[in-house]
Amino acid sequence: MVLLKSIASLFLASIASASPLQLVARQNASSPCAAVAASVATQTAVAVPTVPAQLAYDCITSVPFNQSAALALVDGIVPYVKWQSTTAYLKDPPEEYGEKIQDAVDIWGELEKIRAKVVDGAYENEFEFGFELYLFSQTTHDGHFVFVPDVIGTVFNWARKTPLVSVSSDGKELPKPFVYTDVLAESFKNASFTPSAIVSINGQDASEYLENWSQYGSLQDRDALYNNVFYELASVSLGGSGAGMGTFSGSGRGRWVYPGAETTLEFENGTTVTYSNYARVLIPFNGITDGESLYKLWFTGNQPTATEAEPAPSNSTTPTPSSTPSATSIPAPGYPPPVLREEHNLIGGYYLDDEYSDVAVLAVPSFVSLDSAEIPFQQIGENFLAAARKAGKTKLVIDVSANGGGTILQGYDLYKQLFPNGIGHAAADTFRAFEATDLIGEKFSAVSEGLPRKLVDESDNETLFELEYEVVSSTLNYQTDVDVNENNFPSWDAKFGPVERHGDNYTNLFRWNLSDVLTPWNSGGIYIHGYGNLTNFTQPFKAEDIVVVTDGYCASTCTIFSELMRKRGGVKYVSLGGRSKAGATQAIGGVKGTNNYPWSYIQFLAQYTATTLAASPEEAAYYNTTELGDYWSNVVFDRAAIGSSINVNFRDGIADGDERQTPLQFVYEESDCRILYTKEMTYDVTAIWKAVADSAWGGKSHCVAGELGGYGKRQVKRERSIQDKILARRIQQWRRGLSIEDYPLDVFTDLRTNRLSGNAIMYP
Ligand SMILES: *[C@@H]1O[C@H](CO)[C@@H](O)[C@H](O)[C@H]1NC(C)=O
Ligand SMILES: *[C@@H]1O[C@H](CO)[C@@H](O)[C@H](O)[C@H]1NC(C)=O
Ligand SMILES: *[C@@H]1O[C@H](CO)[C@@H](O)[C@H](O)[C@H]1NC(C)=O
Ligand SMILES: *[C@@H]1O[C@H](CO)[C@@H](O)[C@H](O)[C@H]1NC(C)=O
Ligand SMILES: *[C@@H]1O[C@H](CO)[C@@H](O)[C@H](O)[C@H]1NC(C)=O
Ligand SMILES: *[C@@H]1O[C@H](CO)[C@@H](O)[C@H](O)[C@H]1NC(C)=O
Ligand SMILES: *[C@@H]1O[C@H](CO)[C@@H](O)[C@H](O)[C@H]1NC(C)=O
Ligand SMILES: *[C@@H]1O[C@H](CO)[C@@H](O)[C@H](O)[C@H]1NC(C)=O
Ligand SMILES: *[C@@H]1O[C@H](CO)[C@@H](O)[C@H](O)[C@H]1NC(C)=O
Ligand SMILES: *[C@@H]1O[C@H](CO)[C@@H](O)[C@H](O)[C@H]1NC(C)=O
Ligand SMILES: *[C@@H]1O[C@H](CO)[C@@H](O)[C@H](O)[C@H]1NC(C)=O
Ligand SMILES: *[C@@H]1O[C@H](CO)[C@@H](O)[C@H](O)[C@H]1NC(C)=O
C-alpha cells in the first residue's frame, strides 16, 4: 500500500466518491472543428496555418469534458506540486509583496477547488477546465511554476494582428500605447498621417486594459509584466525561443489566453479600428471532424503525429532545422553591427559611435543553452571584454533585457569574468525538505560515498559515468554543495535539516562549490572564472564604469547574475519602461528562484532511486510504500501541451544577510534609475544604451525616478582612432540602411522547434 501523506491523501481519498464518468457536450460540436480542418486543408503553402480566433475558440470549446480523465490529471499533479518551494510564501506573502507585487495565492486551496468542480461536473467543456488548471500555475506569477494542459497549448495559440509599443513622447511624459507599425511608419518617414496614441481597447481605458492583460504574463513585477505586453527588440532578437512581439500580439504567455474574436482600438485622434484576432493551428487536422474526435486523437495520450508536430531533437552541435528562421539567421532588428555575437543572439558585444566611442555594450538577452551554447557563450563574453579593453573602451553598459535565464553557472561565470576577485555568492540556496527529497537525497548521498568524485569518460565505464553524472554531481548528494560558510557538509542529514520556516520545512542553506571538479557537468561544459585553472584574470572595468539595464524581464539565472552584480559588484541597475505611472520601478521582475526542476526530471529522480539505485528487491518494494511510489503515473506528461515546459521552482534564493530568510522574489527592490522608452528606442536599441550612458556618465540624466549620479562626466576622447572612425561609419551606414521591412511582424514563441535548456530558466 502506498503511504499517503497529508496533502496527497486529501486528494486521493475522494477519488472513490467521485461521480461516474460523465461527458458534457455543450453543443453540436462537429461544425467548428470541421471548419478548422477545412481551412487548414487549404493552407498547404504555410508552415503554420491560421484561422479566425472565434472559429478556433468555438472548436476548442466544443471538446467535451471528460470527468474521469480530468480527475486523474488533477490528482496526478499533486506529487509534483510538493516540490514547489514557495507554496507557504505564496499563500502568506510578506506585506510589501502583497502591496506592491502580487496577491497571495493558496496553491493547494486552488487545486482543491478545481478538483471539487471536477467532481461536481461543473465544467462545461475541456477547455474551461484546462484554462482553470493553467491559471492555477500562472496566477502564482512564479515563472518557474508552470503546467500547460494539452487543450490549452497543443492545438491553437492565440494572436492579435497588431503588436503595440508603450512610449513616452520625450522621455519624461508618462508613456502611451501606440500601434508599432504606426511608429515605424512615422519614424521611417512613410506615414501619410500622424500616429495617434491608443486611448481605449474594446471600450476600456487603454492602460487599464493593458495592465489587466499584462497580468497573464509569467513575471511577478507589474511594471515588468506591462513591458512584456509590447514589441521589444531584445525579445525579438531571440526569435521563437523568446517572448517574441509581446503578450498583446500573442507571443510569450499571451499565446495561451483567448483574446476574444476582435480587438477594437480607439485612437486619440478619434479614429476607431476593429481587427479580427486569429489563432495559429499547431497540429494537423486530419481526421478531426468535431470536438469528440479532437479529444480522442490528441488528448488521450498517444498523439497520432506527435513526432510530426514535435521534431526529434537534432544532434546538439547541429542547428535545429525548423520552420522558423535557421539558427544563424535569427534577425536582430534594431541592433547595430556587432563586434562579436553568438549565433542565436544569446550574447553579443557592441561599440557605440561618435561621442559614445568610449562605451562598450554587452547585450545578454539569455543565459540559455540552445544547441550547447555554453562554451561559445563564455568565450564571447571573455573575448569581447578583452577586445573592449584593448580598444580603449572605459565604460560598459550591460543589457539583460528579455533575459529569462538559462544555465546557472553561466550567470556565476559572467559575474566572475567582470569581478574575478569578487566573492562568489550573494545568496544561498534551499529547497523543500519533505519525504521525497529526503529519501532521494539519502540514497544519492550513500551511493556517492562509495564512489570517487571525478569526471569520467563515458567510453571507459558507462555504468560509472552514469552514476557520476546523475548521482554524484547532483545537489541531492550532500558532497556537491557547501554550507553558508563554504565548508563541506559532513552528511546528508547535516544538509537536509529540516529547518522550519514560514510554516514549511526547508533544507539548511547551501551554496555552489565553484571549485568542484564536476563543475563542467553542471555548467554545460565550462569552468568558472576565478576558480580552478581560470584564476589569472584582471578586472576589466571598475564597478562605477559598469551599468546594467533591464526591461524587468530578468528571471532565474538572470536574477542570480544580477544579485551578484548588485550586492557583490556594487553595480547600479537601470529599469526601463513600466506602467503609465510616475515613480520608481524594479529592475528585476522575474522569478528569483535559483533552479527549476522539470516534472519529468522529478519523475526520473523518484523512479531511478526506486529502481537502479535500490540495493535489493526488498528495498525497491519499500520505496513503493513511500512517497516515491507516487511517481509512476504518466498522466501529467500525456496531458501536457506539446512543446510546453512543465516545471516547479525547486530552489529558493535567500539573500546573504537576510535574517528572515525570505525567498528573493518576495522582496521588493527598486532600481537605481528608471528610464522611459521613447519611440526611437523601439527601433534602434542604441538609443537605449546612449540614454543609459548619458545618465550614468554623461551628466545628462534620463532617469524619471532615482539617479545614477556621483560618477562624474565621461572624458570623451577627442582623438578618435582609425578603428573608431571605421566603426562610426559602419554604424551610420547601418542606421541609414534601416527600413520598415527589417522589423519582423511574424515572430512568435515556438518551443516545439526551439529547444531551450538550462537549469534556471523561465520558459517564455
Ligand atoms: C450538427 O452536426 C451534424 C453532424 O456533423 C450536422 O449534420 C448538422 O448539420 C449540425 N447541426 C448544426 C445545427 O450545426
Ligand atoms: C475519458 O477518459 C477515460 C480515462 O480516464 C477514458 O478511458 C475514456 O475513454 C474517456 N472517454 C472518452 C469518451 O474519450
Ligand atoms: C510606404 O508607404 C506607401 C504609401 O502608403 C506604401 O505603398 C509602401 O508600401 C510603404 N512602404 C513601406 C516600406 O511600408
Ligand atoms: C488616427 O490615428 C491612427 C493611429 O495612428 C491612424 O491609423 C489614423 O490614420 C489616424 N486618422 C487620421 C484621420 O489621421
Ligand atoms: C481582466 O479583467 C476581466 C474583467 O474584469 C477579469 O475577468 C479578468 O480576471 C482580468 N484578468 C486578469 C488577469 O486580471
Ligand atoms: C547524429 O549523429 C550521429 C552520429 O554522428 C549520426 O549518425 C546521426 O545521423 C546524427 N543525427 C542527426 C539528426 O543529425
Ligand atoms: C564500472 O564502474 C562500476 C561502478 O563503479 C563498477 O562496479 C564496475 O566494476 C566498473 N566496471 C569496470 C569494467 O571497471
Ligand atoms: C517539519 O518537519 C518536522 C520533522 O520532520 C515535522 O515534525 C513537522 O511537522 C514539519 N513541519 C511542517 C510545517 O511540515
Ligand atoms: C569543493 O570541491 C573540491 C573539488 O571537488 C573539493 O576538493 C572540496 O573539498 C570542495 N569543497 C570546498 C569547501 O572547497
Ligand atoms: C583548464 O582545465 C581544463 C580541464 O583540465 C582544460 O580543458 C582547460 O583547457 C584548462 N584551461 C586553461 C585556461 O588552462
Ligand atoms: C598572469 O597574468 C599576468 C599578466 O597577464 C602574466 O604576466 C602572468 O604570467 C600570468 N601568470 C600565470 C601563472 O599564468
Ligand atoms: C512499484 O510500483 C510500480 C507501479 O505500480 C510497479 O510497476 C513496480 O513493479 C513496483 N516495484 C516493486 C519493486 O514492487
Image (tube, rainbow, N blue to C red):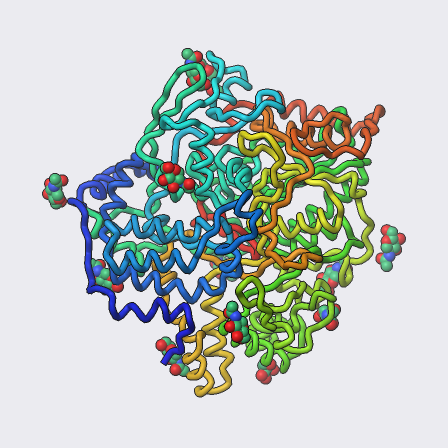
In this rendering, position of residue 536 left or right of residue 173: right
Q: Which quadrant holds residue 528?
A: bottom right
- Where does the image place residue 496, in percent across and percent down from the top left? 60, 72
Query: Observer-nearest residue: 502 or 458?
Result: 502
Tally of numbered tags: 0
Q: Is residue 53 above or below residue 141?
A: above
Residue at image point 61% right, 44% down = 588
Between 703 and 287, the one lying in front of the other is 703
Asked if 310 appears above or below 59 in the picture, the reply is below
Instruction: Name which residue lies at 49% across and 72% down.
Output: 436
Q: Residue 305: horizontal and vertical position, in percent?
A: 32, 54
Q: Quadrant of the N terminus?
A: bottom left
Residue 47 at least partly seen: no
Of residues 209 and 59, the one nearer the viewer is 209
Outermost residue toward the top in this view? 192
Mark yes or no: residue 266 visible: yes
For ligand 12, give the image quadrant.
Answer: bottom left
- For residue 681, above or below residue 324: above
Residue 725 location, quadrant? top right
Q: Indicate the position of residue 681 as horizontal and vertical percent values.
A: 60, 28
Residue 557 appears left or right of 642: right
Whole-percent x, y for residue 732 in the image = 67, 23
